[in-house]
Image (spheres, rainbow, N blue to C red):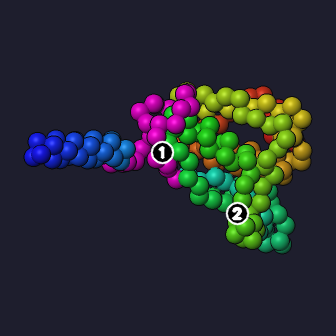
Amino acid sequence: MNVKKTIIAVLVILAAGAAGWAAYKNLPRAGGGETPSGNGIAGGDVADLRTRQISLYYYNPENDKDGSGNVMCSAAGLVAVLRQIPITQTPIRDAVNLLMEGKLSDGEVAAGITTEFPLAGVELMGANLKEGILTLEFADSQNKTGGGACRTGILRGQIEATVKQFDGVNEVRFIPEELFQP
């Protein structure tokens, strides 16, 4: 009878140890940084269930007026909104795709924050970061990225501000070059 109790006790201890080890392996590491993938572009698999906070840049025209009250259509109107994204090997792509969903909270809308995203037919096809230059390739099957200078400048500015928060991104280029043209 004592042998049975001893075996059960050993099994319980082993199970508790295995559960503890599994929990330890899933703890966030010091620094909470990215997976060791390099530039955050290639790949795309979710590393684990951890998340990181990023900023998406939307627009508030009230922050972008001159002394006469005219909207200037400048970067002064860009407003960072905080979001959580899973830690993956593609945080830049994840951030741009989330920005393009255009989902604003009721509180953000009430604060005057706007966006023209999502744009039907606009899709991020690729991202390549090389020597500080991030090249973003989009498909725009319905020509939704065009329009007036104010609109296209804000759309472009939203994407540029969002991706420049990532280490190593110094300049942003778009393919095709006709995107975001008035």
Image: 79 above or below 19: below
Left or right: where 92 falls relative to 7: right
Secondary structure found at label 1: strand
- The residue type indicated by label 2 comes to Ser
Residue 49, label in figure: 1
Locate residue 91, reporting x and y percent. 55, 40
Left or right: where 114 falls relative to 127: right
Locate residue 14, reporting x and y percent. 22, 41
User: Which residue position is annotated with label 2?
Assistant: 105
Q: For marks 1 and 2, give the one nearer the viewer.
A: 1
Q: Quadrant of the C terminus?
A: top right
Residue drawn at the location 50% of the way across and 50% of the way down: 52
Q: Which stretch is magenta? A: 28-53
Left or right: where 70 falls relative to 136: right
Residue 46 falls inside the magenta stretch: yes
Residue drawn at the location 22% of the way across and 42% of the way down: 11
Image: 66 above or below 177: below
